[in-house]
Structure formats: C-alpha cells, structure tokens
Amino acid sequence: MGRYRLQLHDGPASPVVTETLDVSADGDALDLARIVLLSTSNYTHAEVYRGPALIGALERDSYSRS
C-alpha cells in the first residue's frame, strides 16, 4: 500500500485540511479524492501528493454530480 496525502481547500481564508490515504496506486488515490470532494460542499478543490510529488489536482467545478 502506498501512502498519499490529500489536501482539501476552501479558499484562501480557510485552513487546508489534510487527510492520509493508504491505497495501492495513484489512480486509486485520485478516485478517493474525487469522491471526498464531491460528497461534501465544504471544499472547492483538492490536491493529492505521493511524498513531495503532486499526483493530481481536482476542482469541484470540473465534475458534475449525478
């Protein structure tokens, strides 16, 4: 299992919320980040890191909910 860091943002005035994800691949980490971002209205965007490397960034507006 890999250890990833999910950083959730809600604008510059709010502190960043950091969560740890234990998953096996970059794609799994991005999928979980997408689920977290879309399942709550508290955050506008998210970033996923593996160590110091940015794996991906997601914005709420770039995905639609069904």
Image (spheres, rainbow, N blue to C red):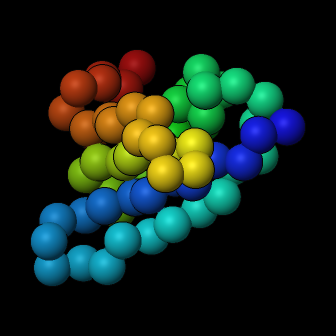
* Rendered position, 19 above or below 48: below
* Rendered position, 3 above or below 12: above
Q: Based on the displayed image, in which of its 4 quarters is residue 5 positioned?
A: bottom right
Mark count: 0
Image quarter of the N terminus: top right
27 or 62, which is in the foreground?
Answer: 27
Q: Which residue, as the protein is rendered here, is positioned at the far right? A: 1
Where is residue 44 drawn, in percent x and y? 25, 52
The residue located at (31%, 61%) in the rendering is 9
Where is residue 47 drawn, in percent x and y? 39, 46
Q: Which residue, as the protein is rendered here, is positioned at the far left? A: 12
Task: Report if residue 50 is visible in the image.
Answer: yes
Q: Based on the displayed image, in which of its 4 quarters is residue 63 positioned?
A: top left
* Rendered position, 21 above or below 26: below
* Rendered position, 12 above or below 29: below
Taking the image as shown, residue 5 lies to the left or right of residue 12, namely right
The residue located at (14%, 71%) in the rendering is 12
The residue located at (59%, 62%) in the rendering is 19
65 or 13, which is in the foreground?
Answer: 13
Taking the image as shown, residue 35 lies to the left or right of residue 42, namely right
Image quarter of the C terminus: top left
